[in-house]
Image (cartoon, rainbow, N blue to C red):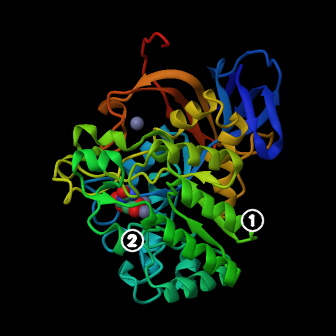
Amino acid sequence: MDTILIKGGHIIDPENNINDEFDIIVDKGKIVKVEKDITPFAYSKVIDASNCIISPSFTDLHVHFRDPGQTYKEDIKTGSMAAVAGGFTTVVCMPNTIPAIDEPSLVRYVIEKGEEVGLCRVLPAAAVTKGRRGKQLTEMALLKDAGAVYFTDDGAPVVDSHIMRKAMEYAASLGTFVANHCEDLSLSKDGVAHEGEISAALGLPPLPPEAEETMVARDCILSIRTGAPVHICHISTKLAVEVVAWAKAMGANITAEVTPHHLYLCDDEWLDFHCKAKVSPPLREYEDIEAVRWGLSSKIIDYVATDHAPHAHHEKMLDHWNCPPGMIGLQFALPIVMELVRKDYITMKRAIEALSTEPAKKIGLKPPSIVEGEKAEFVIFNPNEPWEVTEDKILSKSKNTPLLGRKLRGKVKYTFFNGKIVYEDTSKEEFCYD
Ligand code: NCD
Ligand code: ZN
Ligand code: ZN
Ligand code: ZN
């Protein structure tokens, strides 16, 4: 399969200002022609991309592949399979593995295992503090040299403000940044569900939104004072978005990401008492969802990151306190963002920036380009095709998501990476559109 002709697709490549219908010829992994109406003749494979968008492949700067240490939940191979099925060809693995990614040999392990699997680019984020214990900074320069793309203790906040400030300054001097899981643990306490009508009605231990908001504010102030960049992981409340908007207006070097689940689901997912709804930060209220959608469209929130957090079935069956927080996300990012496009919250171009080019640039990668001479690294997706979320379609080892059994619209058809097709959708589903 040396030559592939892709016919009838609509290319959107924001970095190269392309937004039009073109056919593409890929030969030996390279894009050799991007032109209108190429006649199919003697190509070894023709892909019908009518009704599809072709965009640079997606980048997810926040995934948990649990490798090393908890590979019964996920490993770098199954995580990579889920990634390319979701249209992602670059992912950044969080360091909250066992052991934590806090030394260069562990950074190398993730990179080398990712390369061995070869489905996509698997890059590690390294821990801010040794063992993610919050006490002592890691050897950040050595970790960076080994290939860590940024620093975070995700799963836990950097609680100590002095350590946070020092880490931000070191990271800045190395040309990178710290990403913080903003949660004041003395406020979140044993909270399980967002504090509001739902937690009260169900009697679930409440987790107040200010647990997130106060630490977002602290990090904004540290960034304004030091000039060092800071990144806010999984922003989820209206007030947190407003704080980031304020800090950006003050000229702070701050970025924020939002997850598909915080863009789409609210705390009424708890109504059947099942811990599939448990995630950190918790699912919020309708006005928070509206706020993060607005934040994404107005670029107060810079990009989408899935926070793909696989957990085993037996773990998600535990009681509310003991069940680990987290839900998978890699295969739902595209359909959820497409729902926002359909409902006019964001434009298709902004959707592609938020899934692809913005996160790539954030870690200093040149976003993939759909132009002649480049290696093929793009995704072909039908933004409207409906599908039902069923366990067999989830390529992750873990199936923990409240979306099981629901119908979504927006489907990845092909993912290209490093000149090759790394994912092809073969499922057939008959649906009437509602
Ligand atoms: C994440 C996990 O499971 O590692 N869980 C979650 O609910 N988001 C940790 C994290 O992202 O904070
Ligand atoms: Zn987190
Ligand atoms: Zn809801
Ligand atoms: Zn996370």
The residue nearer to you, when weighing 274 against 432, is: 274
Other residues around mark 2 within 10 Å, as few (<14) / some (14–19) / many (≥20)? some
Look at the picture and state if 104 lies above or below 383.
Answer: below
First in sequence, mark 2 or 1: give its number: 2
Q: Which mark is residue 111?
A: none
Judge whether residue 94 can be spotted in this image.
no
Q: Is mark 2 within 8 Å of ligand 1?
A: yes
Using the image, tell me which numbered label, if any, was put on residue 249.
1
Does residue 142 appear in this view? yes
Under mark 1, the amino acid is Ala
| C-alpha span from label 2 to label 1 | 28 Å
Label 2's element?
loop
Nearer to us in this view, 173 or 288:
288
Q: Residue 232: x and y, percent?
A: 55, 65
Circle 2 sits on which residue?
156
Q: Residue 217: where, in percent of width, then height?
A: 56, 71
Q: Are marks 2 and 1 in contact (CB under 8 Å)?
A: no
Q: Which sits in the foreground, 115 or 85?
A: 85
Residue at image location 34% in from the left, 67% down from the top: 188
Neighbour tally class for label 1: few under 14, some 14-19, many 20 plus, Cα within 10 Å: few
